[in-house]
Amino acid sequence: MSGSTVLIVGMGITGMSMVRHALGCGRTPVVADTRANPPLLAQLGAEFPQVEFRHSDSFAAIGAVAGDFDEVWISSGVSPAWLQLPSGCTPCGDLQLFGESCLQAQAQGKTRARLILITGTNGKSTCATLTAGRLAASGRRAVAIGNIGVPLLDSLARWQSDGWPEIIVAEVSSYQLALRSRTAADIACLLNVSPHHLSWHGSERNYAAVKRSVYEQVAVGVFNRADKHSVKGATAAGRQVGFGGSDAREGEWTVQRGMLMRAGASPADALPASALLRIGIMPENAAAAFAIAETAGCPLADDASLGWLSVQRGLAHRLHHVASASGISYIDDSKATNEAAAIAALAAVGAEGTVLIAGGDCRPDSSFARLAKAACKLAGAVLLGDSASALSKALADLPICLSQASDMNQAVSQASAMARKLGARRVLLSPACPSFDMFSNFGERGDAFALAVRSMGGSDEVHAA
């Protein structure tokens, strides 16, 4: 709606992409935030001095003026409930705007690009990267966008000038899905669901429902047979394709007997899960990526797929082997910002013979009871950050060595000494918490871990988990 006014709530990466999109569509944006000096405010003023910025003391105050605008766009991380919007005011997110723009471009004959949506509590960045990479390796013009790197709306602007891809692989969050409507996709995949972002969604039930909604208005639903929410949600799609789980059907990609393979295939046509873990890739994410890529038109050639995968590398801060020293491997899994991710990491590398470094920003709903069950075979754990006390309480009854550290350098030093004393083979940073108590993001936390490890003289060799 050219000429309309848009209230954009949140001056972050998504909010900035919304500003660019609004101006490109001929709309007049006004940006509002509860932070007086949000991270990208200076960039907003430098690039778009004509765009007004409003600071408000609360989201409710921002919502009170929403009726003065033709549209309200909400950036990721801001819940519509916090705004207390007036009746009849329907907010919009970047996924909805992206989908509408794609449909418009298709109607105008500018593109026939197929859209793949990938979500999940954990693993979606790796899965999206592998999916786009496998498609590209097979000769398809595929790109991975969204939370994985380039914002959805900024991608649109690039394609309008440089040409559209053939296949779009979009990693999307629960925030984006909650604000999505009327947006169809060709293929969707929900990898897994575990409690997360409950302060935004209100309850675990609401969060799971939003994640399952990725399958709505979708032609093909690729689902994880090992996750009940993925199985349930996929029934909304026009057609279903499964992967993973002990009940995988013949021909489906899964992980069996420690091998990534098609169910029913010969072990000769398989890749050891341990080989993937050494390069920082969860085998289950690889199985999902292969299932999605093949559904999107990648040739069904096991040797080609497995050969391609064997030379890939996982994303930073996801089971990344930083170094080794004195026979001990140091593994950076800083991206494990929730219990489920840390539990998956322990299952992947093995709790036995591991000293865990955990802790960070403590969520109000975190009891760490599930982590305690997975940690019973650990050699020890070093706890840090705001959640150290809660973690210590949760792990106190386990027959493992425990200590607390004040910073990452001390945590690595204590974990290293503990590993040598106990004969442990690895030190794993898998915090089970966000990083915001001590770091600006999980990447900075992982970098601090790597720096501390290397300061002890660890070599940059990759060693088996």
Image: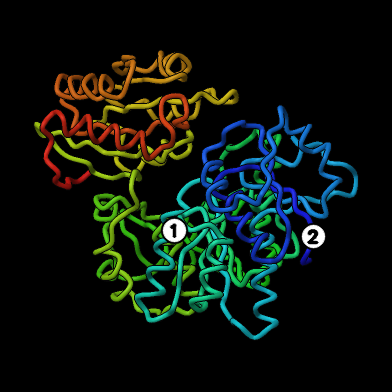
- Specify the amino acid type for callout 1: Cys
Instruction: Kindly report the distance in space between the C-alpha atoms of the residues bearing marks 1 and 2.
Output: 38 Å
Where residue 413 sits: x, y (%)? Answer: 21, 21
Q: Write down the residue under mark 1.
A: 127
Q: What residue do we see at 33% from left, 72% from top?
A: 305
Q: What residue do we see at 41% from left, 74% from top?
A: 135
Q: Quadrant of the N terminus?
A: bottom right
- Horizontal relation, residue 21 to residue 433: left or right: right
The one of 130 and 148 positioned closer to us in this rendering = 148
Q: Write down the residue under mark 2.
A: 4
Where residue 206 sits: x, y (%)? Answer: 71, 42
Name the secondary structure under disc 2.
loop
Q: Name the quadrant containing residue 268.
A: bottom left
Q: What residue do we see at 28% from left, 66% from top?
A: 267
On residue 423, the disc is: none
- Specify the amino acid type for callout 2: Ser
Residue furthest out toward the right: 87
Where residue 201 sits: x, y (%)? Answer: 69, 39
